Image (cartoon, rainbow, N blue to C red):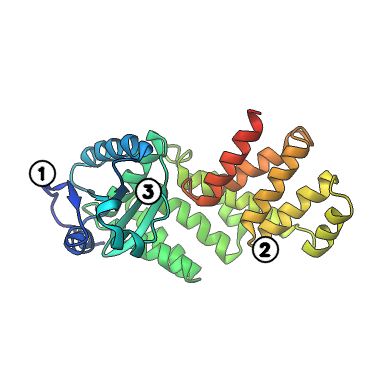
């Protein structure tokens, strides 16, 4: 059984203005017991005026399981540089003194809700959030079997935990057992089958199957160089690039293909882009940049 988290904080302490001087206490120390969202904003930032209130509403709805600190970048320039804030709004989430999630730019209300709910789950009364973070760290460090065991333990206590379910599927992918990952994805409980985490895991399964059949990158590059209009070679090269971990280059190739011939092979370039976007976090810079470029092409 997992441990017990600290009692819910009073609403008056949920949202506050932070400074460089209070960052350690308000964020690092406070996040030892409850996730803390840090909203880097400025008075002159238009999107911040929309995102900030939406985040605050979601934090209040979490009823003490998440806290929020607002940092005005103009008044905390040294901290902003230390956190490598390049554009605003930028949002980071801290738990147990470490950044665990984040995004840049304004995002839809539905994504804000999911973002806060995921963090709130980390502060659940059963301590599953701490185990979830540990499992993700295991997976990131290559200990996929240990991660799978931990995700499974979480699901034994909370069968409809979408983050744990998606993590378990990804663990089997990391182990190399695509069939078991597919079986798990297909058997996801109805309540979480359409969750961001499970949908992303399904997209990663599809990409993993493609990677297993990907052609030689150098040969495909040569084919595209010989004939820049070879649609199939461009698509196959994008698959090979993604298989070798060159995700941004793969997205760029698919965007070039879409620009050249959006209807080729029943819109295969657009479909593949959506698969890649779905496998990544919605706030991933590759997703944000790729969606912007795709939208500009669609509406030209």
Dot 2 or dot 3: first in sequence order is 3
Front-lying residue, 151 or 183: 151
Distance from Cα at disc 3 to Cα at disc 1: 29 Å
Q: Which residue is mark 1?
A: 12
User: Looking at the image, is mark 2 or mark 1 earlier in the sequence?
Assistant: 1
Q: Residues within 10 Å of mark 1 (few under 14, many from 20)?
A: few
Residue 113 higher or lower than 13, as above or below: above
With 253 as the anchor, is 83 left or right in this view?
left
Say which element carries label 3.
loop
Q: Residue at x 84, y 49 (%)?
A: 228
Q: Quarter holding the C terminus?
A: top right
Q: Which residue is at the far top?
A: 299
Residue linked to disc 3: 161
The tag on residue 244 is 2
Nearer to us: label 3 or label 1: 1
**Residue 37 visible, this angle:** no
Q: Is residue 151 above or below residue 116?
A: below
Residue 292 drawn above or below residue 276: above
């Amino acid at each position: 059984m997992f441990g017990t988290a600290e009692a819910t904080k009073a609403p008056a302490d949920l949202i506050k203005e932070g400074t460089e001087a209070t960052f350690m206490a308000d964020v690092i120390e406070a996040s030892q017991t409850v996730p803390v969202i840090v909203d880097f904003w400025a008075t002159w930032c238009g999107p911040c005026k929309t995102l900030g209130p939406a985040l605050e509403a979601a934090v209040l709805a979490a009823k003490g399981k998440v806290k929020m600190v607002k940092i005005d970048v103009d008044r905390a320039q040294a901290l902003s540089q230390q956190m490598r804030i390049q554009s605003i709004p930028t949002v980071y989430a801290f738990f147990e003194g470490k950044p665990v999630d984040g995004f840049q730019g304004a995002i839809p209300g539905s994504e804000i809700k999911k973002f806060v709910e995921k963090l709130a789950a980390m502060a659940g009364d059963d301590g599953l959030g701490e185990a979830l973070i540990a499992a993700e760290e295991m997976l990131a460090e290559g200990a996929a079997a240990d991660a799978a065991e931990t995700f499974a333990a979480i699901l034994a206590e909370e069968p409809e935990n979408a983050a744990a379910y998606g993590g378990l599927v990804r663990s089997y992918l990391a182990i190399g057992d695509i069939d078991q990952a597919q079986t798990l994805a297909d058997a996801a409980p109805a309540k979480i089958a359409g969750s961001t985490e499970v949908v992303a895991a399904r997209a990663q399964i599809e990409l993993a199957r493609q990677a297993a059949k990907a052609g030689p990158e150098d040969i495909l590059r040569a084919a595209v160089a010989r004939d820049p209009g070879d649609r199939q070679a461009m698509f196959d090269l994008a698959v090979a690039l993604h298989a070798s971990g060159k995700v941004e280059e793969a997205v760029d190739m698919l965007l070039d293909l879409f620009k050249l011939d959006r209807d080729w092979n029943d819109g295969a370039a657009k479909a593949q882009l959506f698969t890649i976007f779905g496998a990544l976090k919605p706030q991933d810079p590759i997703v944000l940049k790729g969606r912007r470029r795709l939208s500009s092409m669609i509406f030209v």
